[in-house]
Every structure is written in structure tokens, then in C-alpha cells.
Image (tube, helix red, strand yellow):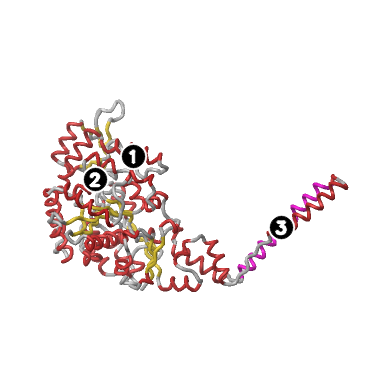
Amino acid sequence: MAAADCTTLPYAATGAFSGLLTDYLARKPALAPFYHRFPELTAFQAQIEEKQAAYSPEARQRLVADLHAQYAELGNSAPPAVAANLELLARNTTFTITTGHQLNLFTGPLYFIYKIISAIKLSQELKAAYPLYDFVPVYWLATEDHDFAEINHFQLFGKTYSWAGPAGAASLGGPVGRLPLTGFEEELLSQLPPEVPAAFREAYENANTLSAATRRLATSLFADYGLVCIDADRPALKQALRPLLRQEIQQQASNQAVQATNARLTTAGYKPQVYSRPLNLFFLTDEGKRERLEPDAAPGADCTQVTVRGTARCHSQAELLALAESEPERFSPNVVLRPVYQEMLLPNLAYIGGGAEVAYWFQLKDVFAAFGVPYPIVLPRNSAMYLSRANAGKLAKLGLTAPDIFKPLAELKKQVGAQLGQEEISLAAQQQALAAAFQQVQELAQRLDPTLVKTVAAEAQKAAGSLAGLEKRLSKAAEARHETAYAQLSALKDKLFPEGGLQERTDNVLSILINNPGFIEQLITCFEPLKLEFAVVQEG
């Protein structure tokens, strides 16, 4: 892709990101206590050494064995680049760069794609900088998430496509990755436009669960880049949770760490992103639900230790510890402990996430310390706006550059108007002259007949109002001369900022891939994760 097809601007210049994120990228000292190493190339040598010392051969063996099993269960061998990376993961000189996301249908919003490409590109950049090591991009499937309503739909060309799921799925409250694809063909696949690429259909047609379908789709899109997908809702992998579960059940260590961090974040002027609970664990019930574990039941309850919310089930601490030892797969970490579980399983160096994820990772540094797990480098994913040829042409015709489109609409109208030769209408000077004239009249009235002062003031106010009304009418008249250009500007602004937000938070990748099959390759060329800037990608 030509350099002209990709431009960047500071995140702060977009006006679309939180103060915490822009302060992090600016390396504000107030945030320094909440992360370990800043995401820059030179920081990775120390991160490699730290992780290499902490990550055991047993952990690596467990990971590689189960990943082979996960791919084997799909019925086909892993694509060559993926298989090669699985082999590399068996070596103690191989590390991962990880991103994670919910199992959104058909990838959901564009940032799903941007996250994965950020992980791929960073892996490539690290290999070039540190040739003695290997780096594998990993997509962590959020299979244990139980919020079905968040993931059961996606938007394409202004239409929302939804899947009701198996009977009772909306109220089931179980891990979404386990959901069978009952009714998917009739409710969703058969409704898709015919131009949707076959790979998107086949991923769901050839899978039994939502987890398997999401893996198939991510693999079909990124197989050539060696992306490894991991589903951590596996009995073999959950064995790694035993020490974490013991410490959490006995000491409630994570909540204590988060609460202390939250107090410091608040003092520094930042609002905590996620809520921590006394026990940051869920329990996977026999009925398939994922229910919160709650210590210290209400007064008068039969169970005075730990209850499984929404059920009659309760356990003493000793019983819960015994379960954690014999059946760790019955436990599921919540948002506070899931990152720790991830870093225990993987030889990981960096986690790539969106702005909200960066914010909650900043609550977790002391949690990692409490469990003796190295805290990774936290890297904001690449964020981008895509400009089709048509939209790029409209922008150029209006005399605007890509960074201009982030300005408020009123400011853009003035800019376009100036370029089109529109006069800027302002009667401020006339208002001042009018006020001066009436001031003289008021002074005359004061000398000759003070009872007329109020009358003069009323006339002055009336005249000022009339002049202001004329200013508005003249402005509208000037604007009407370029009404077509302003209408085009407003339409373009709405198109590039759907529902007033960034395109990446609403639009699906199919809206681009259907007309630009080389889109992913464009992003691979364009994205530079460690540049830490917002990208504008123009159709090549």
C-alpha cells in the first residue's frame, strides 16, 4: 500500500478517547505507578527476560498440548502458518503477543479486526528487533463470557442481523462459547446478502459451537499470519488455576489489591473502569449457568460461607477449596482475574486492548503482584478510520484533509465556507456602534427628562434584537449559496461517525471487505502498533 493511503494523527487530536488513554500515551507521571513497562521497542528485552524466568516448562507443555487438541477437534489440521507457530510455542525462546475479544457474530465491530492485526504486526516487529526469539500472535476467545445479548447481533449496511440462540439462551447465563448453533442457518445465514464471502458462512456451517465457529472464522481471515486462537474454558488448562483459586478463596487477595489501587487512581484523578467483588470468581453449575460466588451470605441464611448466586448451593471455605483442587474447571475468573489466568497460561509479553481495557488493566498491577505473575506490557490496539475511494473523493472535493473530519461540524462548515468564498457574516461592529448611539441618546434623556431613560433602554434592546435577527438571516442567506456542499459535508460526517461515534465501534468488516477484498492486507501494511497514533486508511 502506498504511503499516501495511510496517514496518522495523535489520539488526542480525534477527541474520541478518554483522558486516561491520552495521558498514558503522553506518559503522564500520574499514571506511571499503574503499569510496569511503557510500550516501546526497547522495553521488550527486559519483559522477555522476566517472563522467561517465571514461565515454567510444565506451563508451556500444558499450553501446547491443549492447543494441538483444540485445533484437532475442528476436524482439520491447522493451517501451515498456524501449525508452525504451535511448534514454535514448544520452545522456551517463543513468546506470545495477545489480544482478546468477545465471540461477536461475524467479528462484530471493526475493532475486533484491528485488535488482531495489532497483535500480528507487533509480533512481526519484535521478530525483526529480537531475531533470537520468536513471537506468536494470539487471540484469546472470551468463551466464558455469559452476556449473550452483547454478542448475538451485528450490523451490516445499516441493517442489524440477530440470532436468538438455542432455546432459553438469553436467560441461560452460561458461557457463550459452549452454545450450540441451533437455528443459526435459518435465522441468520439465510438472511445474509449473497455477496458475503463464503468463508464467513462456512465458519458457522461447519462448527458445532459458537467457540468453534469464531475460531474457524478468525483462522480463515488470519491463517496466513499464523494467528493462534485459544479457548481457555478447558479442563486441562483450568488445572493451572489451582494455586490462584486457593489464594483467592482463602485470602480474597484480588479484591484487596484492586480496592487499594482504585483509591490511588481516584486520587490521581481517574475513574476506575471495572468493579471488583469480594470473590472475583464465578461457578459453572450443573445446569450450565455461570453464577457469581458470594462470600458471607445474608444474616439468617443456612450457608454462612460462600453461596452460588441464584442457586440453593452453598459451601464452606474448606468445601470450596476441595472443589478447587479436584475440579478447577468448575470455576471461572471474572474480569479482574481473567487477565491473571491468561498470563499464567501463556508465555505472554504484551496485552493489546481497547481504551476501556487499558483502563481496567491499570487497576490490576497489584493483583498480578499478589499472585506472583509477571504483569505484561499493556498496549492500546491500533485504532483507525477507513475511507473508501468515494468518501475520500468527497473529502478532497470539499477541500478537507483526513484529520479535518474530526473537527466539530460547525467548525468544518466555516472551513469549507471559507474555501468556497463564503463571507463570514458578523454584525458585531454594527452592534457596538448601535449601542454607542443609544448610549448617547440615553445620556441626553437623562439630562432633559429622566422618565424617558427606560423608554430609550427598551428601544435600544429592541434595536439590538432586530440587528441580531438580521445577522441570522444574512448568515442563512450566505450559507444557502453553498447548501449542496454543506449537505455533502453533513452526510459524510454522519457516514464516517455512525451514531456520532467512531466508525470502528459500529461498522462490520464485511461492509468494507465486500468491496475491498484487500482490506486486511492494507491494514497489515498500515498499522504500526508502537507508533501509538490513530490511523486513517484510504482504499487503495
Look at discs 1 and 2 and give the one toward the viewer.
1
The residue positioned farthest toward the right in the image shown: 448
Residue 340 is tagged as 2
Foreground of the two, 275 or 396: 396
Which residue is found at the position 84% from the left and 45% from the top? 451
Give, as a three-letter code, the residue at label 3. Gln
Which residue is disc 1 drawn over? 261
Cα gap from disc 2 to disc 3, whole angstroms: 65 Å
Which residue is disc 3 drawn over? 431
Dominant secondary structure (helix, strand or loop) of the stretch shown in magenta: helix
Report the magenta residues as a range.
452-480
Which residue is found at the position 72% from the left and 60% from the top? 430
Residue contact between numbered discs 1 and 3, judged by CB atoms under 8 Å: no
**Residue 63 vs residue 529: left or right?**
left
Cα gap from disc 1 to disc 2, whole angstroms: 16 Å
Specify which label sits upstream in the sequence, 1 or 2. 1
SS at badge 3: helix
Instruction: Identify the image quadrant of residue 245.
Output: top left
Give, as a three-letter code, the residue at label 1. Thr
From this view, report whether residue 327 is shown above or below residue 349. above
